[in-house]
Structure formats: structure tokens, C-alpha cells
Amino acid sequence: MTLPPELPLAGVTVVALEQAVAGPIATRHLADLGARVVKIERPGEGDFARRYDDAVHGLATHFVWLNRGKESLAVDLKSGRGRDVVRQLVARAEVFLHNTAPGVVDRLGLDAETLRAADPRLIVVNISGYGTSGPRKDRKAYDMLVQTESGMAAVTGTPETATKTGVPSADIAAGLYATTSVLAALLRRERTGEGAVIDVSMFDSAVERMGHPMYMQLYGGRQIPRMGLSHARRDHPL
């Protein structure tokens, strides 16, 4: 696929070991900006989001939404040859991003420390459920769980019923924070030649979006109520 040279990330290569939503939406935006994104998938089944449904000419709606503009390569990462292939791809890339389960990249030898020892200019992005430290760092996460734990569901819905958002908001938040962080790291790399390690968690990303309810509780002494389609400022002039 040939992209217009005037796109801002033309010439940037991203290797992504990703699945579902958080990783793919981050790299989808990078692809939209002109980056070459090489998506690593499991042989046979690939990204499990491929199987969510078959509404788009036999393809899953989530997969089509999140993976346009990318290249895909099926690699058996359980084999030494497969891991070597990925390392060779990363060696020619500016960015390596993953949203695998805790500990996976360490077992594969694709962790940030190992990869950046070979190329200090590399930008490595780790998208996790709960971060790289603390009591929950080894826990897997999914969107609905994080929406409830972060408090999103407590302020969404009606007075009678707490509700998760209709789209995967925690996943999307993590992916977009990863995208903006990559753009900043690429800018710094151009200026200084220095790469980066970026850690983004779904939980932290969801909590950050809860700033309005948090400050209201801390300083106003009250919780934002669930109001359906109404707004907390409905009685105040704009």
C-alpha cells in the first residue's frame, strides 16, 4: 500500500503485537496519519476481534473499524523463527506497540529493555490493564470491568440503573492516550535521537476521564448523579 508522502507520519514504521481494541485503535490512528503499520497476528485465528461478527462482507465490524490501512503478518511466536522474524521487523521500525496479556512480551524476549538495548532510538509502547507496578499489574482487564472499577458506570445511565457506555470507552481512552504519547515521542526523537518507553493502562486512562466527577466529589462534596441524556449544567446558563 502506497500512502501520500505529505501525510505527517509517512516513512514511520510501526510493528504492533495487538488484539481487540486498545492497541488496534492506537495504531489505526497512526496509520491514518501515514505510518506503515505491520500487525502481527496468530496463525490461523489471528486477532480474536476478527470473529466478533461477520457483518461487513464477512468481516467483523470491530475488526474493520480498528484495522484499516494496516498490513497483517501471521507469525508463530512460539517458535524461535517466528520471534526472529518479529525482531527483524522491529529492527527496521521506529515504534513497537503491544497490548498483550501481562508477561507475554517478557517471555517472548520482546520487552522494552531487550529491544531498546539493540536500538536505543526505538519507541516501545506497553498498553496494559492496570500498569506495570502495584498489586493489580498481573491482572488481565477488559473494557466493562475497567468502566465499573474506574467509576465510569457510576455516573452513566439513569438514576435507577448504572450503565456502561455503548462503546468500549476504557479501551478507546487507553488507545488514544497511547497515540498522543507516540506522537510526542516521535517529535522528541527527531530533536534528540532518543527513543522512549511508554506505559499506558486502561485503568489510569479511564480514571483520568473521570476528572469532572472526581473534583466535584473532592471539592463540592457531592457525586455527579446519573442523569440519562440530561447534563449536570442543565439549570445554568451557558
Image: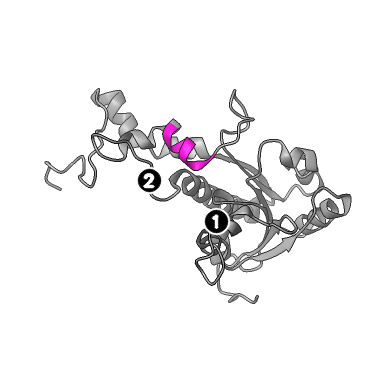
Left/right placement of residue 57 relative to residue 13 reads left
Q: Nearer the viewer, residue 52 or 208?
A: 52
Residue 94: give x, y in percent of width and height.
Answer: 69, 56
Residue 238: give x, y in percent of width and height.
Answer: 15, 48
Q: Would you identify the image quadrant in which residue 14 lies?
A: bottom right
Mark 2: which amino acid?
Thr
The type of colouring in the image is one colour
* Closer to viewer: mark 2 or mark 1: 1
* Image quarter of the N terminus: bottom right
Q: Nearer the viewer, residue 188 or 148?
A: 148
Would you name the residue on which mark 1 appears? 52
Q: Which residues are magenta?
A: 142-148
Left/right placement of residue 13 relative to residue 233 reads right
Instruction: Count the numbered circles shown.
Output: 2
Mark 1: which amino acid?
Tyr
Q: Secondary structure at mark 2?
A: loop
Please say if the residues under marks 2 and 1 sit with CB atoms less than 8 Å apart. no
Structural crowding at the residue carrying mark 1, measured as other residues with C-alpha within 10 Å and reported as few (<14), some (14–19) or many (≥20): few
Residue 108: give x, y in percent of width and height.
Answer: 79, 43
Q: Secondary structure at mark 1?
A: loop
Residue 140: give x, y in percent of width and height.
Answer: 60, 35
Most common SS among magenta residues: helix
Mark on residue 218? Answer: none
Q: Would you identify the image quadrant in which residue 199 lies?
A: top right
**Which residue is painted at 11% across and 41% down in the image?**
235
Structural crowding at the residue carrying mark 2, measured as other residues with C-alpha within 10 Å and reported as few (<14), some (14–19) or many (≥20): some
Q: CA distance from mark 2 to mark 1?
A: 18 Å
Examine the structure image and report whether residue 1 is included in the region drawn in magenta: no
Q: Residue furthest right?
A: 80
Would you name the residue on which mark 2 appears? 165
Q: Earlier in the sequence, mark 2 or mark 1?
A: 1
